[in-house]
Amino acid sequence: MITFETFGTPGWEEMVRLRHQVLRAPLGLEFSQDQLAAEVNQLHLALWLDDTLAGTLLLLRPDPTGTGKLRQMAVRPGLERRGFGSRLVGRGEAELQRLGAVRAGLSARTTAIPFYERLGYVAYGEPFIEVTVPHRSMRRRLDDPA
């Protein structure tokens, strides 16, 4: 089941813990209070297996160009490669479309590029470093089938 969790609630706090475990702790990084506070207006998707948080994805609402953004996707260790990431992306894209987005964009760690390419995303621009690891910008039109 995929739900929207409200900023500052226990569900959101559990999502932060999972994102820290998967995305930050392996790099020796923490979330700053400013980084977390900036999430107040973002949409927080949580994928639950019974009462266990299996995955999470944040969404930035569409900007004036009609581009929404997916960010900070994490799937619980041991549950990878079971389609949970694809389900989160699909639900996120549907929500962005509902909000008026015509495109979805994201910053992918270079190791995740093949995953996003399978979902119809295309890398563009030069590689860059974000949170100490190489990334690429990726995007896809939401009216194109993946």
Image (cartoon, helix red, strand yellow):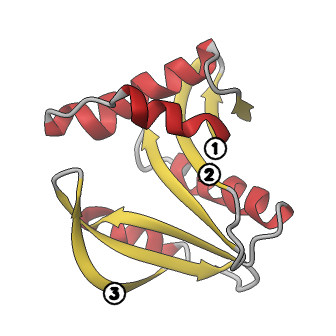
Provide the residue designation for mark 3: 125
Quadrant of the image for the N terminus? top right
Q: Nearer the viewer, residue 68 or 80?
A: 68
User: Is mark 1 in CB contact (under 8 Å) with mark 2?
Assistant: yes
Rendered view: 6 above or below 67: above
Q: Nearer the viewer, residue 145 or 67?
A: 67
Q: Quadrant of residue 28?
A: top left
- The amino acid type of the residue labelled 1 equals Gln
How far apart, in angstroms, are the residues tagged by discs 1 and 2? 6 Å
| Residue 113, horizontal then vertical, whole percent | 35, 71
Q: Is residue 23 left or right of residue 140?
A: left
Q: Residue at horizontal 49%, vertical 53%? A: 71
- Mark 2 and mark 3 lie on one chain; the one further toward the N terminus is 2
Q: Residue at horizontal 46%, vertical 27%? A: 16
- The amino acid type of the residue labelled 3 equals Gly
Provide the residue designation for mark 2: 59
Look at discs 1 and 2 and give the one toward the viewer: 1
Residue 42: mark in rendering: 1
Q: Quadrant of residue 129?
A: bottom left
Quadrant of the image for the C terminus? bottom right
Q: Residue at horizontal 33%, vertical 31%? A: 31
How far apart, in angstroms, are the residues tagged by discs 1 and 3? 25 Å
| Residue 35, horizontal then vertical, whole percent | 41, 37
- The amino acid type of the residue labelled 2 equals Leu
Q: Residue at horizontal 52%, vertical 19%? A: 13
| Residue 96, horizontal then vertical, whole percent | 74, 61
Element carrying mark 3? strand
Rendered view: 139 above or below 131: below
User: Is mark 1 in CB contact (under 8 Å) with mark 3?
Assistant: no
